[in-house]
Structures are given as C-alpha cells and as structure tokens.
C-alpha cells in the first residue's frame, strides 16, 4: 500500500535545508530567494513544482526531498525570484509557460492552500494541454496512510506515493487508477510508460 509524503517530512526537510544553509533564523522564502539565481532561458527541469505560495515552508522541504533524490526542480519564486505571483500579468504568464515547456513533468502539490491558488489550476491546465500524461498530484498530508481526497478534477491525474518493492527496497511511484504505475524517476524523465498492476 502506497503512502504519501507528510507535512512533517516536508518540515523536517526544511529544517535540514536551513541547517545546510546555516541561516536557520531566516524565513524559508528568504533563504530560497538568497540562494536563487535566475534560471537560464535554455535550462531544463525534471519537475515543475506547482504549489500554493502560502506553503513556502512546506515547499522548501518538498523541493529538498526531490532534489535529494536527484531531480532538478523548478520553483518559480526560487528560480525566477523577480516574479510576483500575487499579481496575474501577461509577463508572468509567459515566463511560466516558458518554464513549463522547459520541464519534463509537472508535480502539483495538493494542500489545503492549493484550492485558493490563482496560478495552480492554470498551470495544471496549461501543462496537461502541452504535455499530456506528464502531470501528477503529490498529496502533502498529515498522516502518510490517510486517504487523499482533493478537488474533484484532480482524480483524473495519477498520484505520487511511496512504496516498497518485494525486495524490500523503497521507491517513489506515480500511480493512476486504471492506468497502472511507473516510478517517479521514469515519470520525471518525461517517460509516461505506465505498467499494469
């Protein structure tokens, strides 16, 4: 049975990232912005991380977790610190389109704050239209074993979860009802080759 990433795991990864930066007294947003340099217009990313900006502390942890697994992760306010997500502008939209085209997959971080986001539904729709089958939902929950029930339209996308192979090795999977499964590694490489159960 797959389990989900938890908010406590994200917070723990945030704390570790802060220790690595040796600036634990600063806010997560500030740490990320200080470390950021504008991404090259030709750079590619494994994962475009779609998230609610209200979840900055959690997102720092999710980004660290994914990067520790070897993925190059795009977070708009990190890689393009000049963006102002609080305002919907054509310039911001065009830059986000460019970054989505530079990304192999989109992982939509589902939290309570996600339903209030101005940008997340737009990012999801754009990416799904541009790269069908390369969108997955990563529920960030309180308990790893709880049932995820997000907004109704999210049910059409596969879910990111953790599980263990019969050999005992753990991995991160992308599972879709009726579609089968693949590893996050394959998914983030741009390969949506789902295997049957």
Image (cartoon, rainbow, N blue to C red):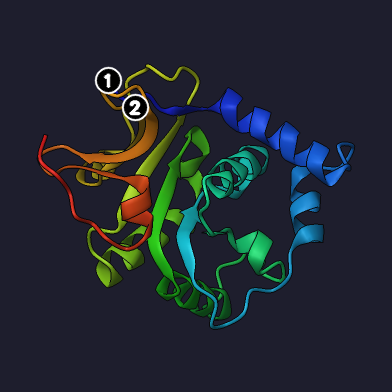
Proximity of marks 1 and 2: CB atoms separated by less than 8 Å: yes
Quadrant where the N terminus is found in the figure = top left
Residue name at image x 63 percent, y 74 percent: 39
Tell which of 144 and 112 is nearer to you. 144
Label 2 secondary element: strand
Residue name at image x 57 percent, y 80 percent: 91
The residues bearing labels 1 and 2 have C-alpha atoms spaced at a distance of 7 Å
| Quadrant of the rendered image containing residue 22 | top right
Image x and y of residue 158, in percent:
25, 43
| Quadrant of the rendered image containing residue 3 | top left
Label 1 secondary element: loop
Image x and y of residue 145, in percent:
38, 16
Residue that badge 2 annotates: 163
Left or right relative to 157: residue 114: right
Res. 46 in view: yes
Q: Residues within 10 Å of mark 2 (few under 14, many from 20)?
A: some
Residue name at image x 47 percent, y 43 percent: 114
- The answer to whether residue 7 is above or below residue 115 is above
Tell which of 118 and 56 is nearer to you. 56
Tell which of 82 and 89 is nearer to you. 82
Which sits earlier in the primary sequence, circle 1 or circle 2? 1
Residue name at image x 75 percent, y 44 percent: 28
Residue that badge 1 annotates: 1
């Amino acid at each position: 049975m797959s389990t989900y990433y938890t908010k406590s795991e994200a917070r723990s990864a945030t704390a570790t990232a802060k220790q690595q930066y040796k600036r634990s007294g600063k806010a997560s947003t500030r740490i990320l912005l200080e470390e950021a340099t504008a991404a090259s217009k030709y750079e590619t990313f494994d994962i475009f991380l779609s998230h609610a900006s209200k979840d900055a502390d959690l997102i720092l942890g999710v980004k660290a977790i994914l990067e520790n697994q070897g993925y190059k992760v795009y977070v708009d306010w990190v890689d393009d610190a000049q963006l102002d997500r609080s305002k919907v502008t054509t310039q911001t939209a065009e830059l986000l389109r460019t970054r989505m085209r530079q990304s192999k997959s989109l992982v939509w971080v589902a939290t309570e704050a996600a339903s209030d986001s101005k940008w997340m539904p737009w990012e999801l729709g754009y990416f799904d239209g541009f790269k069908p089958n390369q969108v997955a939902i990563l529920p960030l929950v309180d308990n790893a074993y709880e049932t995820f029930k997000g907004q109704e339209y999210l049910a059409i996308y596969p879910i990111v979860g953790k599980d263990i192979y019969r050999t005992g090795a753990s991995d991160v999977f992308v599972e879709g009802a009726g579609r089968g499964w693949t590893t996050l590694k394959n998914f983030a490489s741009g390969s949506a080759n789902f295997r049957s159960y």
